[in-house]
Amino acid sequence: MGAAGDTILDQSIRESVDRSTPALRESLVLSGPIADGSLMVVGAHYELETGVVTFATA
C-alpha cells in the first residue's frame, strides 16, 4: 500500500486522495472546465511538518 514507515494515518490520507481525485475528475459539475482545459484536478499530499508536497501518480 504505502511506503515503508508510513503510519496508518498516512496510508489513510493517501488512500483518500487516490479515491477522491478520480471522483472529482468524473464530476458533472467539473467536467466542463476540465474538458476545456481551464481546470486540472490533481491529487497531492501536503506534509504540515515539512511543507513538502507529494503529488499522486494516479
Image: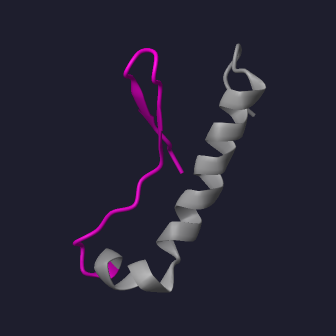
- Is 51 magenta? The answer is yes
Taking the view exactly as shown, the residue that stands out farthest to the front is 48
Q: Is residue 30 above or below residue 8?
A: below
Display coloring? one colour
23 with respect to 6 (left or right): left
Report the predominant secondary structure element of the magenta stretch.
loop
Counting from the top left corner in percent of width and height, residue 44 is at 46, 42
Residue at x 73%, y 21% (from the top left corner): 7
Q: Quadrant of the N terminus?
A: top right
Residue at x 77%, y 27% (from the top left corner): 8
Marker count (numbered): 0
Residue at x 41%, y 15% (from the top left corner): 50
- Is 54 magenta? The answer is yes
Counting from the top left corner in percent of width and height, residue 48 is at 45, 23
Q: In the image, which residues are magenta?
A: 35-58
- Location of residue 20 by image quarter: bottom right
Residue at x 37%, y 21% (from the top left corner): 51
Counting from the top left corner in percent of width and height, residue 15 is at 68, 45
Q: Is residue 53 above or below residue 49?
A: below
- Location of residue 35 by image quarter: bottom left
27 with respect to 10 (left or right): left
- Location of residue 5 by image quarter: top right
1 with respect to 3 (left or right): right
Counting from the top left corner in percent of width and height, residue 28 is at 48, 86
Q: Is residue 34 above or below residue 53?
A: below
